[in-house]
Amino acid sequence: MKPTAKQVAHAAHVSIAAVSRAFTPGAPIDPEKRRRILAVAEELGYISPARRTAEVIAAGAVTLVAGDLLNPFYPTVLDSLARQLQGSGRQLLVYALADSDTVDSATDQILAARPSAIIVTSAYLTSNMARACRQHRIKVVLLNRTQRDIRVNAVACDNYQGGRDVAHLLLSRGCQRIAFVGGIANTSTHAERARGFRDVLREAGRSIHSQIHGNFNYPDGYAAGMKLLGGKDRPDAIFCCNDIMALAVIDAAREHAVSIPRDVAVVGFDDIPMASWNSYRLTTIRQPVERMVQEALNLIDNPDIKPTDEGITRLLAGELTVRDTA
């Protein structure tokens, strides 16, 4: 039988109430008495009710680590993940990183919840955290990004092919001066979309007309749009590395009285809910969010894939969704 609080109290020569206080953070108890109780409890193998409850919850829990929940794409991922986990009777824990936080700075707190697996999206996973997860035998899956510098599982849209599809579309529309609004240079989403886009232009004997980084957010995307559309040598097409920047460019075009798509075609990437709104009707690459989340959970649930393995990367095809802006 499992040790009880009464047995711990008897062995430590304290009351049952003292045992309870010893396991309650902030409860009034002499520090030396707390240490003695905890030592006896560890020797007997006693687990407090609060810790048992936490372990039951964590047994099937998946922690989502996200660093950019202001981007509407990631709440869409969160919604899909929550629904799919609830459908299998599991819990979802969400750890949202502040702009100034790194995954390393939060590793101890993330691991303290003892999740069965961790999904990391829109945050850079360092080798330190990857190593800590392997040591704790916790599976990690990167979602919507890949990293070649660490051994970890990953599920992402085929960003390279998506970039190629956008370039083919704009070339087929007869666009001549094609600009690119990039995201954050050291992310796989930016790098792969840009590489695919640039490769097709080069194959057609063309190059990017002008390029500005919009850092995947609305304010910087808007500033990029104002600069591109306010100059004398204005582009006739703009590929934005995500939808939120594309919407910002459309708003900037309105400020300059530039007609879309008559004067400038605009294409995004993600297909966030706002992309289909009547005020935007954005042409974009739709990421297969439901399938991406399901693949991430498949990697987590597959017993043949171990936390110490080299890592598996699965790329899923996006879908070119043509609306009114191109």
Image (cartoon, rainbow, N blue to C red):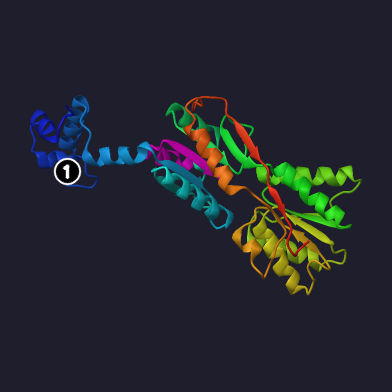
Residue 150 spot, x, y in % from top left: 59, 31
> Is residue 92 visible from the viewing direction of this image?
yes
**Which residue: 62% across, 33% down?**
313
User: As displayed, is residue 122 above or below residue 112?
Assistant: below
Residue 23 spot, x, y in % from top left: 21, 40
User: As displayed, is residue 118 above or below residue 172?
Assistant: above
Q: Which class describes the residues within 10 Å of circle 1: few (<14), some (14-19), or many (20+)?
A: some
Residue 213 spot, x, y in % from top left: 72, 54
Whether residue 117 is in magenta: the answer is: yes
> Which part of the image, by quadrant, shows the N terminus?
top left
Secondary structure of residue under mark 1: helix
> Which part of the image, by quadrant, shows the C terminus?
bottom right
Whether residue 261 is in magenta: the answer is: no
Q: Nearer the viewer, residue 235 or 323?
A: 323
Residue farthest toward the front in the current orientation of the protein:
87
Q: Which residue is mark 1?
A: 21
> Is residue 122 visible from the viewing direction of this image?
no
Left or right: 37 in relation to 233: left
**Which residue: 44% across, 43% down?**
63
Report the amino acid beneath label 1: Arg
Left or right: 266 in relation to 184: right
Q: Which residues are magenta?
A: 105-121
User: As displayed, is residue 16 above or below residue 150?
Assistant: below
Residue 278 spot, x, y in % from top left: 66, 69
Mark count: 1
Residue farthest toward the right in the current orientation of the protein:
205
